[in-house]
Every structure is written in C-alpha cells, then in structure tokens.
Image (spheres, rainbow, N blue to C red):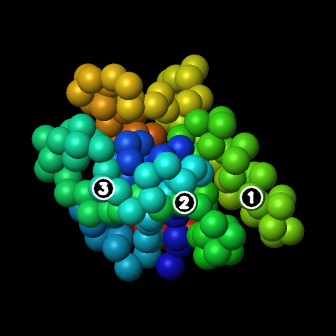
Amino acid sequence: MVKVLFVCLGNICRSPLAEAIFNQKIKENGLSQKFKSDSCGTSDYHIGELPDERTLQCAADKGIKISHRGRQINRVDVREFDYLIAMDKSNKVNIERLIDSSGLSHEQVYLIREFQPDTDQIEVPDPYYGGIEAFEEVYDILNDSITHFLEFLKEEHKVYV
C-alpha cells in the first residue's frame, strides 16, 4: 500500500482538506486498497483540535466528510509514509529539516502544486485569516492538484483500474 502524508502548518485548514479530497478520490476510483493518506502540521499549535470550521464547511459543501484531529509531523512519519506532500515552501523546508536532523533520508518530498498543470504558482495559500472564499479557492487548488497527483501515483506504481 502506498502511503501519502499531506502537510501544512497547523493541520486544521489545508492538509486535512487535502487528505479528505484524496481519500474521496481513491474511494471513487476503487483504489482504497492501493493508497492510504493522513495529514499533519509542522507546528504544534493545534494538536488534538478539529479542523477549522470553514474547512469543515467547505468540505461538506462538496459532499466530503472530514474526520481528523490535528497532529504534528514526527520521525515515524518520515519512515512510514512513501510521499510527504507539503502545502508551501516553508512546510517543505520544515519537513526537510526534520529528515536531516533525524539522520533519515526521504526522496519523495513534494509541494502539492508541483502536480497542478497550467499554473505559475507553487504554494497553496493559507486561508486561515480569510473568509469562506479563501477556503473555496484552496479547495479548487487542492482538488485539481490532487487529481493530477493521483494520476502520477497510478502511473508511478503501475496501478490500473
């Protein structure tokens, strides 16, 4: 089973939404036995908390259920997950620092928007200080990026449905 970890700062806005979108897509495509995902944050700000209400609302409006509590990335994650997917450059740097400080190696660290075609943007904006429109924008970015990321994974791991 291929394991994917989505990572943002606090694990209450972007990464739990990414996890939920990914899970919905693998379920719809009959790939739940092939792929698994989780999410976490690089900070300890929101450990144990539910996702932001606006994240939950945005997901619910799209028919996606989120069942998650905030947690912080750790060394076990680096060993256990095949792909570490950051929402922005700062998150990616923090992931790489954790990898370096733990003496581990990990080649599969990406920014999620690396998989989004036709964009010159590389980061998913943090919607925390915005309104529901900011969360809708993040949903659209993640939905598109994850669609292409899943295609990449299927090709990379020779998964055909």
Q: Nearer the viewer, residue 132 or 120?
A: 132
Residue sitting at 70 percent across and 47 percent down? Answer: 94
Residue under pointer 3: 50
Residue position for label 2: 72
Whether residue 149 appears in this view of the structure is: no
Quadrant in which residue 38 is drawn: bottom left
* Of 7 and 146, the residue lying toward us: 7
Task: Identify which residue is drawn at 65% across, 35% down.
Answer: 89
Task: For label 1, count other residues whose C-alpha is less than 10 Å away and answer few (under 14), some (14-19) or many (20+).
Answer: some
Between 110 and 53, which is closer to the camera in this rendering?
Answer: 53
Residue at point 18% right, 41% down?
57
Q: What type is the residue that disc 2 sits on?
A: Gln
**Three-letter code for the amino acid on which mark 3 is drawn:** Leu
Q: Is residue 65 above or below residue 94?
A: below
* Image quadrant in which you'd find residue 52: top left
Labelled disc at residue 75: none
Give the alpha-carbon distance from disc 1 to disc 2, as whole Å: 12 Å
Q: Which residue is mark 1?
A: 98
Circles 1 and 2: CB atoms closer than 8 Å = no
Q: CA distance from mark 2 to mark 3?
A: 13 Å
Q: Mark 1 or mark 3: name the one nearer the start of the chain.
A: 3
Q: Position of residue 29 (x, y in %)?
A: 29, 63
**Residue 117, image x and y in percent?**
51, 31
